[in-house]
Structure formats: structure tokens, C-alpha cells
Image: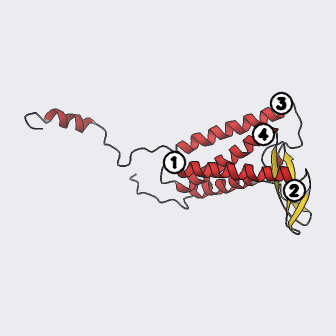
Amino acid sequence: MPGGDNGDMNEILEGAAPAPRNPSRPYVRPMELATIGSVVAFDQLTKEIVRRTIGLYDRHPIIDGLLDITHVQNTGAAFGILNAADFPYKAVVMIGIAAIALVAIAAYATQLGFHERFARFGLSLILGGAFGNLIDRAIAGYVVDFVDIYWGAAHFWAFNVADAAITTGAVLVLLDMIGLGRQHASHSV
């Protein structure tokens, strides 16, 4: 500095931690928010169409012997777990479990780096699907499922758009965890 001693400034700079080359960025980005919002909107739209146009347990074949649209109500967890179980405050317990899962997933999402694109997109799909199903549980006490895939007498669990987003998101997170789809930066060990 003109007319001053740079020694104090150098001591301060030498003792300070180096500034990061890429400043920390928050997890939430417009693309993730758009993905979450799109999943919730499409999920709720398709469920509302099913509620209004297909009677409960009615079946509409799409691909004979493989795919039907069947209106069912899932009061349990994923894949119909606890669907047949009946216990006091079941709806409240299911909402609580879903809310805890959402908080845990969102907390994990905040720990992801910018370069973990598969995981960030996957978690956005999971969050959108979880919100979509949570809306159903909070409003009606059950989730509307309608995609019924089967082969002969073997049926997969009926599912919906939210479930498909959650499953796709989980696959993307797993792919990221094993290193697929991630651009690795060189790390010194």
C-alpha cells in the first residue's frame, strides 16, 4: 500500500485460510426446484384424473396381459407394506414416517457437492415423489395408485407417478454412489 507497511497485511494473509476457488453453493438450485415441482404437479394431476374418471378398483386395460390402469388406495407404505394392517392412528403414523423421511432426504441433499449431478437430480426426483405421496396421505389418509403391471397371474404392486419418480431417483443416487455419472476431480491423498 502506498505510504503504509504491507507487513501487517502479509501476516494477516499468511495466517488466513486460503479462499476456496469455488465458493460454497447451497443445495437448492432452480433445476432441482423445477424437478421437484414438476414431479409433484404431474403426480397430483394424474391422481386427480384417476379419482375423477375411474371407480375404485375399476380396471382399464392398456396393454392386454401386461398393463392396466386400476384405481386402488394404498393406506400403507411403499409397495403396499402395512396396507392390510389396521391400527389406531395409522394415517398419522404414516404421515409422520413420510415427514421424517423427507427431512432426512433433504438434509442429505444439502451435503451434496455441485459435481454430484446424478445424486442431486435423483434426490430431486425422490423429494418430488415423497411430497406427492405425502399430500395424498395428509389430505385423504391414503395414496392413490393406478399403474398395474402384471404377467399372467403375477402382479407387481400398483404404483403412481410419485412412486416411479422415487424409484428412478433412488437408481440415480445409487449410480452416483458407485461412481457412474460423476465427473471426478483429482484429490490429493
Element carrying mark 4: helix
Question: Where on the picture, by quarter, is residue 177?
Answer: bottom right
In the rendering, which numbered label is found on residue 70?
A: 2
- Is 162 placed above or below 142 here? below
How many other residues sit within 10 Å of disc 3, few (<14), some (14-19) or many (≥20)? few
Disc 3 from disc 4: Cα separation = 12 Å
User: Residue 162: x percent and y percent?
Assistant: 72, 51
- Is 13 placed above or below 73 here? above
The first of marks 1 and 2 along the sequence is 1
The first of marks 2 and 4 along the sequence is 2
Q: Amino acid at mark 1?
A: Arg
Disc 1 from disc 2: Cα separation = 36 Å
The first of marks 3 and 1 along the sequence is 1
- At horizontal 89% and vertical 36% (from top left) the residue drawn is 86
- At horizontal 73% and vertical 54% (from top left) the residue drawn is 161
Q: Which residue is mark 3?
A: 89
- Is 67 placed above or below 39 here? below
Confirm or deny contact between disc 3 and disc 4 (CB under 8 A): no
User: Residue 142: x percent and y percent?
Assistant: 82, 42
Q: Amino acid at mark 2?
A: Thr
